[in-house]
Amino acid sequence: MEKLILIKYGELTTKKDNRKTFIKTLETNIKNKINNLYTSITKTMSRMYITYDEINEEEILKKLTKIFGIHSIVICVCVNTNEDDIKNKVLEILKDKEFKTFKVSTKRSDKTFPHTSMEFNNIIGALVLKNFNTKVDVHNPELNLEIEIRQEGTFIYNKEIKGLGGYPVGIQGKGLLMLSGGIDSPVAGYLSLKRGVNIECLYFESPPHTSLNAKNKVLKLAEILNDYSGTIKVHVVPFTSLQEEIYKNIPGNYNITIMRRMMYRIAEKYAKRRNCKILINGESIGQVASQTLNSMVVINNVTNMPVIRPVACLDKLEIIEISKKINTYETSILPYEDCCTIFVPKHPVINPSLEAAIEYEKLIPYEELINECIKNIETIKIKKQERDELL
Ligand code: ATP
Ligand code: MG
């Protein structure tokens, strides 16, 4: 049987032209996700209608609840805007439902319809009372029957599924996410996608100090994020030589500071090449020595590109809560080493000096090494089927 879903848009504080882009991008994203599951998609400035065969309902809902820019998803029935048709449809919809209490909520935007919303609530309320053994409860009804009377038709429904909100992915262009295997950076990626920023990921690996398992873990995290985007690429940077040079030549307490300055340099250079406008990472103020404000000043100093840190002001527990909600937590806590956790000095500097960092860096031929890293980046396009095979 053919059915109808009505999509209500997410955060539409946007103005006219932005709104058009919002709707167009959302439509493209929806089409990409449910490409073989729907029969038609029609959009207006305030909502979108999707028709589909009932067999695909579960699959479609699973996908729509992972698309940013959707405020709510409503499975509904559409009839011509005429009193008898509406009444007949209401009786048909309710005939298989169990409900001890109910309420009717009419919204009339087609002012040519002869009854006001209040009048029509009463008309339909009386009809339901006459035909079913039930009572009205306007405060906490078991069944809330919504009737939207619009020019294009009347929509009747009783269940609204919450969407993810936010902006459609891609509306803001692209950012480069520094993705590690930890808890924080996948959450940072998710929150950026939520604001409409598409992401590509950059992962620094240091084999043989870091293992294939560590890399596969990152790919798996990218794949979970890919459910919210659909276009993610992971660029893997071979970081071993540069990292070994740092550890051989630079005093231990500055290792992490310098290593992170190198990561930022590589990320900025590569972001430009990939047409990414910003860098994104999972730094959180005060979490570790390299994330004190003083460290951030010294580390951030190597780039002019905006660096967005979506979890900067969240507590670890708040970050964990999001990671559980988006399903990255269980993967993030797998115990594989990251290039940041190998060679960790006993006493990393928490108040680094910029001058000292610049002096120490002169001890290694970092520009050459950075170019070498970038030259040897391996790009992996994330595909859905790979998930189970990765770990
Ligand atoms: P955790 O949840 O354990 O804190 P993390 O990923 O936040 O994990 P940090 O050491 O706090 O790890 O690193 C701060 C940020 O730097 C990360 O969120 C990530 O954006 C970036 N980063 C760290 N290591 C890597 C790496 N190997 N590749 C890419 N980005 C990295
Ligand atoms: Mg962290």
Image: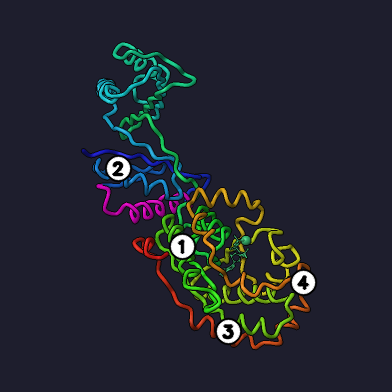
Task: Give the residues in magenta.
Answer: 18-39
Sooner in the amino-acid sequence: mark 1 or mark 2: 2
Beta carbon at label 1 within 8 Å of ligand 1:
no
Left/right placement of residue 137 relative to residue 52 reads right
For the residues labelled 1 and 2, the Cα–Cα distance comes to 27 Å
Q: What predominant SS class does the magenta segment belong to?
A: helix
Q: Which residue is mark 2?
A: 57
Locate the C terminus by quadrant: bottom left
For the residues carrying marks 3 and 2, which lies nearer the camera in this image? 3
Sooner in the amino-acid sequence: mark 4 or mark 1: 1
Circle 3: residue type: Ser
Mark yes or no: residue 356 visible.
Answer: yes
Beta carbon at label 3 within 8 Å of ligand 1:
no
Sooner in the amino-acid sequence: mark 1 or mark 3: 1
Say whether residue 29 is magenta: yes
Circle 2: residue type: Glu
370 in relation to 9, above or below: below
Give SS at disc 2: helix
Q: Which residue is mark 1?
A: 222
Callout 2: 10 Å neighbours few (<14), some, many (20+)? some
Between residue 89 and residue 367, name the one nearer to us. 367
Residue 120, by quadrant, is top left
| Picture disc at residue 352 | 4
Mark yes or no: residue 196 visible.
Answer: no
Q: Position of residue 324 (x, y in %)?
A: 52, 50
For the residues carrying marks 1 and 3, which lies nearer the camera in this image? 3
Q: Quadrant of ligand 1?
A: bottom right
224 in relation to 87, above or below: below
For the residues labelled 1 and 3, the Cα–Cα distance comes to 25 Å
Q: Which residue is mark 3?
A: 241
